C-alpha cells in the first residue's frame, strides 16, 4: 500500500529529525529582527517568524518536544492503565467495583478538558503537560485492559495455570498479557496521535512549553497573530502537524487490520 | 423500564459525586500556597488571610468539602476572584454562546456525516467509499486549532466572505461551527458506515430487497433507523470531545462562550471560576450521556428488557 509507505516515511522522517535535532546545528532561538516575518531564504528554507527566527529550525525542535511528550505520555499511560486494568479484572469484587467507578469519574470529564484544567492549575511546563495528559490518558488503557482480561480469565490455559498453583503476577504476565497485547498496541498507536494533538492544543493555549522553546502548538498560536502578513507561519506548522497525526492514524488503522483486533473484542 | 431508569440515575449520581470530589481537589493541587499564587507575592498578609478565609482554605478538608457541596446544592459555585461576581452568574452569561456553537457544530456534523456514511456503505469498495474513508481519516487528523486558522485564512482574509472572529451576526457562527464540527463529522461518518454495513447484511434487508424496494428506499426506511442506535450512543460520548474542542475553537475565534471563560480563568488564576466551568461542563456531559442511555433503551426494547 502506497499510503502505508507514505505514512511510514512521514513518521520515520520526523522521528529521525527529532532524534538528530541536537547534532543538526539548529538555531531555533536566534533572533534576527531584520529577517522578521520574511519568506524563504537560503539560511531558512521555510522563512522566518515574527522575531526573525528560522521557522524550519523551530519546527524541528518543536517536533522533538511533541514526540518526546507523546512517547512519555503514552508509555506512562499504557503502563499504569494496563496494570490497573488487569489487576482490577483479576481481583474482581470490591476492588474492581471501585476501579470501575474511578474510571467512570475520569471518563465523565469531556476530552482534554481535565488536562486543560490540570495544566492550568499545575502551571505551564513540559513536565506538567506530561502529568496532565497522563492523568487523562491512563483511563482508556485501563478500561481496555480490564475488559480484555475479563474475557481471558476463564480460559482453559489460565485455569490450568491457577490449578498448577501459579501466582497472580505470573499468570497476568505470562498468560494474560501476551494475549491482550495486540489491542493495547493498537490503542497505543491511536493514543500517540491523540497526545500529539493534546500537547499541541495545550501549547496553543499557552499551557505547554514556554518561550523561547518551541512546540508545534505554540508556533501555530504565534503564527495566527501574523496570519495576514506571513501566512506561512501558520500553514507550514499546520500542515506538518496534520501530516504527522494523519500518518500515525493511518498506521493505527493498518495495524488494527493486520493484528485483526476485532477478533478480541 | 422504571428499574432501568432508577439504576441509570443512581449510577449517574455516583459519577457526579466523584466529579465533584475531583473538581474540589483541583485547588489543592496548586503547587505551593494557592492563595499566594492567586494574589501574587506582593499581596499583604492581611489580604492573604482574608482570601484564605473567604475561600475557607483555613478550615479542615472535610469541613471545606461539606461547605462546597452544600453551596452546590444551592447552585452557589463560589465567587470569582477577578470580577468579584458569583461564578454561577458568569457561567450563565457565557453558556448560551457555547450551546449555540455546539449545536451548530452538531448540525454541521450530521449534515455531512449522514449522506457521506450512507453513500459509502451503499457503494462499499467503490472509489466514493475509499474517498469517504480517506476524508474521514483526514477529518479526525486535523486538530481544530489548525483547521480554524486555515479556514480564517481562506474565507476571511483571502475571500473576505466571513468575519475573522467575534459573535456578531449569523455569519460569525459559520467558521467556528465548521471548525468544531469537522472532526465529529468524520467520526460519525465512519461509525455510520460500519453500522450500516452490519445492518445491510441482516435478513430483513434481504426481505425488503426481495419486495422490490430500491437501494435508497431500503437504506432510508429499513437500514438507517437500525444503524442509528450505535450512532446515538457514540454521539453522546462524542459530545465530550465537542465540549472540550469548544475551548480551543472559542479561543481561535474569540467566541464569548464557556471555553474562553475557562481559559480566562486559567490565565487570571481565578481558581473558583475554573472549578465552576469544569464542573458545569462535566456534569452536563454526564447528564447528556445518561439521557442518551435512556433514549437508547427507549428506542431499543432489547436493552431495557435485558436489564442494565
Image (cartoon, rainbow, N blue to C red):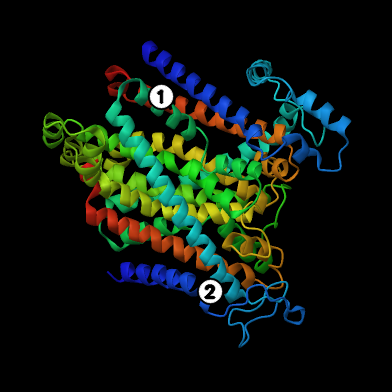
Camera sees residue A236: no
Question: Mark 2 against mark 1, which lies toward the viewer?
Answer: 2
The kind of secondary structure element at disc 1 is helix
Give the residue pinned by disc 1. A98
Q: Residues within 10 Å of mark 1 (few under 14, many from 20)?
A: few
Which of these two is toward me, B280 or A72? A72
For the point 71% across and 47% down, the residue is B167
Q: Chain of mark 1?
A: A
Q: Residue B143: x percent and y percent?
A: 52, 55
The kind of secondary structure element at disc 2 is helix
Q: Where residue A22 is drawn, which disc sits there?
A: 2
In this view, A240 is above or below A202: below
For the point 56% across and 57% down, the residue is A200
Position of the C terminus of chain B, as image quadrant, is: top left
Q: Chain of mark 2?
A: A
In this view, B88 is above or below B166: above
B51 displayed left or right of B157: right
B256 displayed left or right of A208: right
Position of the N terminus of chain B, as image quadrant, is: top left
For the point 28% across and 53% down, the residue is A256
Which of these two is toward me, B98 or A53? A53
Q: CA distance from mark 2 to mark 1?
A: 46 Å
**Residue located farthest toward the top when viewing the structure as drawn:** B2
Camera sees residue A203: yes
Which of these two is toward me, B17 or B137? B17
Query: How many numbered marks does the figure carry?
Result: 2
- Dividing the picture into quarters, in which one does residue B10 lie? top left
A209 displayed left or right of B166: left
Q: Where residue B85 is drawn, which disc sits there?
A: none
Q: Residue A218: x percent and y percent?
A: 63, 60
In this view, B299 is above or below B126: above
Q: Residue B113: x percent and y percent?
A: 42, 48
Amino acid at each position: 500500500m502506497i499510503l502505508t509507505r507514505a505514512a511510514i516515511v512521514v513518521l520515520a522522517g520526523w522521528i529521525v529529525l527529532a532524534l538528530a535535532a541536537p547534532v543538526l546545528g539548529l538555531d531555533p532561538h536566534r533572533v534576527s529582527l531584520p529577517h522578521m516575518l520574511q519568506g524563504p531564504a537560503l539560511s531558512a528554507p521555510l522563512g522566518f517568524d515574527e522575531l526573525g527566527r528560522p521557522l524550519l529550525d523551530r519546527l524541528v525542535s518543536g517536533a522533538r518536544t511533541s514526540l518526546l511528550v507523546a512517547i512519555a505520555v503514552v508509555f506512562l499511560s499504557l503502563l499504569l492503565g494496563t496494570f490497573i486494568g488487569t489487576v482490577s479484572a483479576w481481583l474482581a469484587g470490591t476492588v474492581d467495583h471501585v476501579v470501575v467507578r474511578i474510571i467512570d469519574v475520569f471518563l465523565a470529564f469531556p476530552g482534554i478538558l481535565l488536562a486543560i484544567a490540570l495544566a492550568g492549575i499545575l502551571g505551564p511546563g513540559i513536565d506538567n503537560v506530561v502529568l496532565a495528559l497522563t492523568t487523562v490518558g491512563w483511563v482508556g488503557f485501563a478500561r481496555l485492559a480490564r475488559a480484555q482480561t475479563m474475557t481471558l480469565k476463564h480460559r482453559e490455559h489460565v485455569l490450568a495455570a491457577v490449578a498448577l498453583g501459579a501466582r497472580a503476577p505470573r499468570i497476568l504476565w505470562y498468560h494474560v498479557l501476551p494475549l491482550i497485547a495486540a489491542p493495547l498496541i493498537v490503542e497505543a498507536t491511536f493514543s500517540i496521535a491523540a497526545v500529539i494533538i493534546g500537547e499541541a492544543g495545550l501549547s496553543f493555549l499557552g499551557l505547554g512549553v514556554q518561550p523561547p522553546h518551541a512546540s508545534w502548538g505554540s508556533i501555530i498560536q504565534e503564527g495566527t497573530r501574523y496570519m495576514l502578513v506571513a501566512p506561512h507561519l501558520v500553514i507550514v506548522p499546520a500542515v506538518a502537524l496534520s501530516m504527522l497525526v494523519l500518518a500515525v492514524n493511518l498506521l493505527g488503522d493498518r495495524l488494527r487490520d493486520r493484528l485483526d483486533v476485532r477478533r478480541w473484542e | 423500564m422504571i428499574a432501568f431508569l432508577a439504576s441509570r440515575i443512581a449510577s449517574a449520581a455516583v459519577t457526579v459525586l466523584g466529579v465533584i470530589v475531583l473538581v474540589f481537589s483541583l485547588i489543592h493541587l496548586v503547587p505551593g500556597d494557592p492563595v499566594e499564587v492567586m494574589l501574587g507575592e506582593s499581596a499583604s498578609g492581611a489580604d492573604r488571610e482574608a482570601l484564605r478565609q473567604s475561600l475557607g482554605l483555613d478550615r479542615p478538608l472535610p469541613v471545606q468539602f461539606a461547605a462546597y457541596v452544600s453551596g452546590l446544592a444551592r447552585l452557589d459555585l463560589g465567587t470569582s476572584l477577578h470580577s468579584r461576581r458569583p461564578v454561577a452568574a458568569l457561567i450563565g452569561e457565557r453558556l448560551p454562546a457555547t450551546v449555540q456553537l455546539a449545536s451548530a457544530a452538531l448540525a454541521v456534523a450530521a449534515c455531512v456525516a449522514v449522506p457521506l456514511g450512507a453513500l459509502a456503505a451503499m457503494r462499499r469498495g467503490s472509489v466514493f467509499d475509499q474517498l469517504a474513508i480517506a476524508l474521514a481519516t483526514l477529518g479526525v487528523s486535523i486538530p481544530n486549532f489548525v483547521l480554524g486558522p486555515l479556514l480564517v485564512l481562506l474565507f476571511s482574509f483571502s475571500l473576505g466572505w466571513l468575519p475573522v472572529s467575534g459573535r456578531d451576526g449569523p455569519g460569525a457562527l459559520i467558521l467556528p461551527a465548521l471548525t468544531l464540527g469537522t472532526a465529529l463529522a468524520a467520526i460519525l461518518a465512519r461509525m455510520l458506515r460500519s453500522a450500516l454495513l452490519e445492518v445491510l447484511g441482516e435478513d430483513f434487508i434481504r426481505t425488503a430487497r426481495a419486495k422490490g424496494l430500491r437501494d435508497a428506499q431500503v437504506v432510508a426506511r429499513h437500514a438507517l433507523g437500525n444503524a442509528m442506535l450505535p450512532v446515538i450512543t457514540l454521539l453522546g460520548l462524542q459530545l465530550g470531545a465537542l465540549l472540550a474542542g469548544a475551548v480551543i475553537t472559542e479561543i481561535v475565534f474569540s467566541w464569548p462562550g464557556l471555553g474562553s471563560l475557562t481559559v480566562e480563568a486559567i490565565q487570571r488564576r481565578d481558581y473558583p471560576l475554573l472549578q465552576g466551568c469544569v464542573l458545569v461542563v462535566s456534569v452536563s456531559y454526564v447528564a447528556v450521556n445518561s439521557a442518551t442511555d435512556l433514549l437508547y433503551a427507549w428506542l431499543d426494547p432489547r436493552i431495557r428488557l435485558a436489564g442494565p
